[in-house]
């Protein structure tokens, strides 16, 4: 059995795209927490936020962390807000190597500007300032994670290489 590789970071930090590629390279199964929550509720994340509220979504996220915390051999992409409850990183940390994928606000904006399913970013008009404010609010939480890479200038391939390298160095 191998430790999980858990990817944490803001929206647009490449958790899903580079995570999928890293999983392929490591021969491990890839799980995306947002996608799992969407499948279980048969609703997009944006609909869950709209119809049941953010607090409900955070409860689902917390419950899923507790489930996944006992699994192994997975590459897991978390949602950007996973750091808001410190219990999440504590639980996942037991059987996982956690890597934070940092991204600068302007790059996060470029990477997410066409996405329709990210409720916290709001509509097109005020996206950049909202994103900057949210990232600033969370910066200390992301930067408290010891394994951290700045993905701002990385391609998906470079990012996947770095993830694999750090994962192996932390086994
Ligand atoms: C969120 C990020 C999203 C999703 C939800 C909330 C956040 O995940 O979980 O919209 O609070 O940063 P991604 O980081 O995969 O976009």
Image: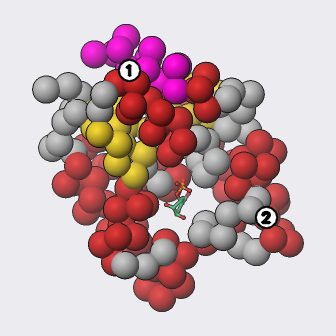
Q: Position of residue 42 (x, y in %)?
A: 37, 78
Q: Characterize the local packing of mark 2: few (<14), some (14-19) or many (20 or more) Cα atoms within 10 angstroms.
A: some
Magenta region includes residue 18 = no
- Magenta includes 168? yes
Residue at 43%, 79% (x, y): give it.
43
Can you tell which of label 2 and label 1 is closer to the viewer? 1
Please tell me in which quadrant of the rendered image residue 39 appears: bottom left
Q: Which residues are magenta?
A: 160-171
Residue drawn at point x = 79 percent, y = 49 percent: 110
Q: Which residue is mark 1?
A: 167
x and y percentages locating residue 136 in the rendered image = 69, 48
Which quarter shows the N terminus?
A: top left
Is the stretch drawn in magenta largely helix, strand or loop? helix
- Circle 2/circle 1 CB separation < 8 Å: no
Front position in the image: 122 or 154: 154
Q: Position of residue 170 (x, y in %)?
A: 34, 15
């Amino acid at each position: 059995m191998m430790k999980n590789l858990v990817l944490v970071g803001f929206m647009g930090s490449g958790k899903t795209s580079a995570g999928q590629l890293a999983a392929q390279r490591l021969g491990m199964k890839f799980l995306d927490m947002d996608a799992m929550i969407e499948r279980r509720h048969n609703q997009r994340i944006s609909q869950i936020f709209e119809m049941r509220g953010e607090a409900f979504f955070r409860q689902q996220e917390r419950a899923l962390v507790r489930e996944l915390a006992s699994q192994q051999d997975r590459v897991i992409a978390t949602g950007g807000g996973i750091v808001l409850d410190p219990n999440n990183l504590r639980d996942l940390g037991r059987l996982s190597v956690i890597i934070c994928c940092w991204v600068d606000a302007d790059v996060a904006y470029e990477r997410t500007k066409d996405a329709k399913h990210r409720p916290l970013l709001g509509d097109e008009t005020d996206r950049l300032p909202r994103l900057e404010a949210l990232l600033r609010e969370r910066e200390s939480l992301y930067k408290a994670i010891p394994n951290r890479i700045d993905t701002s200038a990385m391609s998906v391939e470079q990012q996947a290489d770095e993830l694999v390298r750090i994962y192996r160095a932390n086994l």
